[in-house]
Image (tube, rainbow, N blue to C red):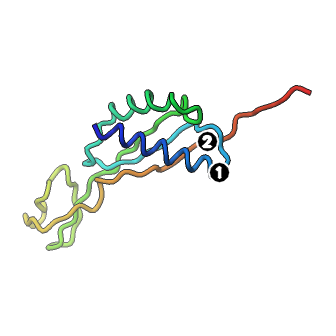
Amino acid sequence: MHELGLVNYVVKTVSRVAEENDINRIRSVTLEFGEVSGIVTSYLYSYWNWYTKKFPLLEGAQLKCLEIPAVSWCDDCKISYSTVAYGRTCPKCGGGNTWLLQGNEMNIKEIEGGNDDKRRDA
């Protein structure tokens, strides 16, 4: 259920960035998150669609999600490997002196925005 908190954080951050850059409409937000971050994308999309309706700046903004593969490192044999495929056990040496290089993070990768055209008739 941390997806709602994540959406709240992203909305606040994107709103702050928009204000700092004099942007009055967000068209899309691209998030990237790790394969083992525990984020459930269906919940994320659902919360995004519900929550952003409360913010005119973000209403109708598309959420895009990219997955960062989980990669671990073995300190014993100095290789990186797929975490999901092998877990904490190095596939080369069979040791457990490993740690996660990437795959648990979440980043706001891109914000696409602009300003609504507000023309006045002369």
Secondary structure found at label 2: strand
Along the viewing direction, whichever of 75 and 119 lies nearer the viewer:
119
Q: Amino acid at mark 1?
A: Asn
Q: Residue at x 45, y 38 (%)?
A: 64
Total count of labels? 2
The vertical placement of 67 against 61, above or below, is below
Hey, which quadrant is residue 116 in on the image?
top right
Point out the image quarter for the C terminus. top right
Secondary structure found at label 1: loop
Q: Residue at x 55, y 30 (%)?
A: 59
Q: Amino acid at mark 2?
A: Gly
91 with respect to 38 (left or right):
left
Residue that mark 1 sits on: 21
* Cα separation between marks 2 and 1: 10 Å
Q: Which mark is residue 42?
A: none
Q: Earlier along the polypeptide chain: callout 2 or callout 1?
A: 1
Is label 2 or label 1 in front? 1
Instruction: Say few, some or many: other residues with alpha carbon within 10 Å of mark 1 (under 14 / 14 to 19 / 20 or more).
Output: few
Q: Position of residue 77 (x, y in %)?
A: 16, 72
Contact (Cβ within 8 Å) of mark 2 with mark 1: yes
Residue that mark 2 sits on: 113
75 with respect to 34 (left or right):
left
The vertical placement of 53 against 112, above or below, is above
Q: Position of residue 1 (x, y in %)?
A: 27, 36
Along the viewing direction, whichever of 5 and 23 lies nearer the viewer:
5
Q: Position of residue 120 (x, y in %)?
A: 84, 29
